[in-house]
């Protein structure tokens, strides 16, 4: 039963590219201070939905994490974060505090002066997450942020993201096609399909993160849904 508190309601959303209909009278309700997972096969409209959600949020109250870290190679970790904070946090001491806290929460405080080419792929993505966290926005939007990470790095990053949400109570929207990622991380899962020539939510559920047996069942169930849709 999905009744934990609505953060964002989309009503009668329609979107087309040229002659391709992506959304047709699309409706959805998402949840405050939770991790909302948008799950679906490649090309089903997940990123388009994330963009629509983004358009409903004030630009100063959201931060992004993408597939690629999108770091500035000539800046160290501290400067990469400071670069995006200068216009958001004018007070230098407060900015410094936010930067160092975000680096601590992502396990990068010892790499505060390292440049991107001195970081591993997983550490680069942690820096990207730290940058989003430091913005102190209520919403973080993440588009396939663990794409290309090996299983060990993926588990580390999932734990970091989960810990950030629990400690900050932020609202996360997280796009993925990986069922295990979705189940390990999510509070609410929304499965998309474009089987009927436009994108719709074909399944949604709340996940109790303390029920490990049910999580294993969800992996099998969600996999079957994706295969058949």
Image (cartoon, rainbow, N blue to C red):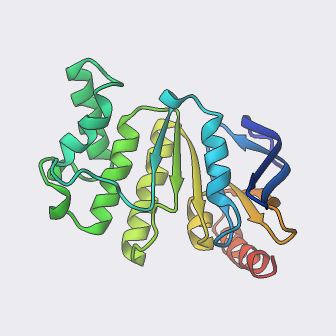
Residue nearest the observer in this picture, 130 or 47: 47
User: At 53% across and 57% down in the image, what residue appears?
Assistant: 143
Is there any visible trace of residue 80 in the rendered image? yes
Image-based side of 186 in relation to 227, left or right: left
Q: Position of residue 63 (x, y in %)?
A: 46, 40
Image-based side of 225 in relation to 82, left or right: right
Q: Position of residue 78 (x, y in %)?
A: 19, 42
Image-based side of 31 in relation to 185, left or right: right
In this view, the residue farthest toward the left is 113
Image-based side of 105 in relation to 60, left or right: left
Q: Compared with residue 123, is residue 31 higher up or lower down, i.e. above or below?
A: above
Q: How many marks?
A: 0
Residue nearest the observer in this picture, 92 or 151: 92
Q: Position of residue 192 (x, y in %)?
A: 75, 63
Residue nearest the observer in this picture, 229 or 212: 229
Q: Compared with residue 90, is residue 79 higher up or lower down, i.e. above or below?
A: below
Q: Position of residue 40 (x, y in %)?
A: 69, 68
User: At 40% across and 73% down in the image, what residue appears?
Assistant: 149
Q: Compared with residue 128, is residue 118 higher up or lower down, i.e. above or below?
A: below
Q: Compared with residue 178, is residue 74 higher up or lower down, i.e. above or below?
A: above
The quadrant in which residue 81 appears is top left
Is there any visible trace of residue 35 in the rendered image? no
User: At 67% across and 44% down in the image, what residue appears?
Assistant: 52
In this view, the residue farthest toward the front is 18
Q: Quadrant of the C terminus?
A: bottom right
């Amino acid at each position: 039963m999905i009744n934990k508190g609505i953060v964002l309601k989309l009503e009668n959303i329609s979107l087309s590219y040229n002659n391709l209909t992506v959304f047709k009278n699309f409706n959805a309700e998402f949840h405050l201070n939770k991790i909302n997972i948008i799950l679906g096969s490649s090309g089903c409209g997940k990123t388009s939905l994330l963009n629509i959600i983004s358009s409903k949020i004030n630009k100063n109250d959201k931060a992004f994490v993408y597939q690629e870290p999108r770091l500035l190679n000539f800046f160290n970790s501290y400067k990469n974060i400071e670069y995006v904070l200068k216009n958001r946090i004018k007070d230098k001491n407060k900015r410094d505090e936010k930067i160092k806290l975000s680096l601590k929460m992502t396990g990068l405080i010892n790499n505060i002066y390292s440049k991107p080419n001195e970081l591993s792929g997983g550490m680069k993505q942690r820096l990207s997450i730290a940058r989003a966290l430091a913005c102190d926005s209520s919403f973080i939007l993440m588009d396939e942020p663990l794409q290309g990470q090996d299983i060990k790095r993926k588990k580390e990053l999932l734990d970091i993201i989960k810990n950030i949400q629990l400690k900050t109570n932020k609202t996360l929207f997280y796009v993925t096609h990986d069922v295990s990622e979705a189940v390990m991380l999510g509070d609410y899962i929304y499965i998309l399909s474009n089987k009927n020539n436009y994108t719709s939510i074909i399944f949604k559920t709340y996940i109790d993160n303390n029920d490990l047996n049910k999580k294993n069942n969800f992996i099998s169930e969600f996999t079957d849904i994706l295969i058949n849709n």
